[in-house]
Image (tube, grey):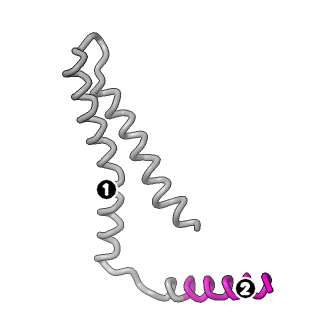
């Protein structure tokens, strides 16, 4: 019984894949992907900048800039998000 359910799942997945490959991407679908990608990258960078600025104001600037540190962390997080969203999810 389990193998029948598995084969039905594979059949359904294959039909969905063939249907999606036949569909042409439109301008708006492409714009949507770029927009989502932009937000997925920008939010951690801007969030890191605001958080670093907050820490700089709260603890003073004693030789280390928290703003720059958290911007770099935000860039790394945004890059990971882009990789995870576009590369890893597209393989599934």
| In magenta segment, residue 2 | yes
Kindly check if marks 1 and 2 are in contact, taking CB atoms under 8 A apart as contact: no
Location of residue 56 by image quarter = top left
Residue 91 in the image: state x and y as whole percent: 58, 66
* Residue ranking furthest to the left: 57
Q: Residues within 10 Å of mark 1 (few under 14, many from 20)?
A: few
Residue 74 in the image: state x and y as whole percent: 36, 39
Is 37 on the left-hand or right-hand side of 18? left
Q: Residues within 10 Å of mark 2 (few under 14, many from 20)?
A: few
Question: Could you tell me which residue is drawn at 29 percent across and 70 percent down?
Answer: 31
| In magenta segment, residue 13 | yes
Residue 48 in the image: state x and y as whole percent: 30, 36
Is 19 on the left-hand or right-hand side of 7? left
Label total for image = 2
Q: Which residues are magenta?
A: 1-18
Q: Secondary structure at mark 1?
A: helix
Question: In the rendered image, which residue does mark 1 sit on?
Answer: 38
Is 9 on the left-hand or right-hand side of 52? right
């Amino acid at each position: 019984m389990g193998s029948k359910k598995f084969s039905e799942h594979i059949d359904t997945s294959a039909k969905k894949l063939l249907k999606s490959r036949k569909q042409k991407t439109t301008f708006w679908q492409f714009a949507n992907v770029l927009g989502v990608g932009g937000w997925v990258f920008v939010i951690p960078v801007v969030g890191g900048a605001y958080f670093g600025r907050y820490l700089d104001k709260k603890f003073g600037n004693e030789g280390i800039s928290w703003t720059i540190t958290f911007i770099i962390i935000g860039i790394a997080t945004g890059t990971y998000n882009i990789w995870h969203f576009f590369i890893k999810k597209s393989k599934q």
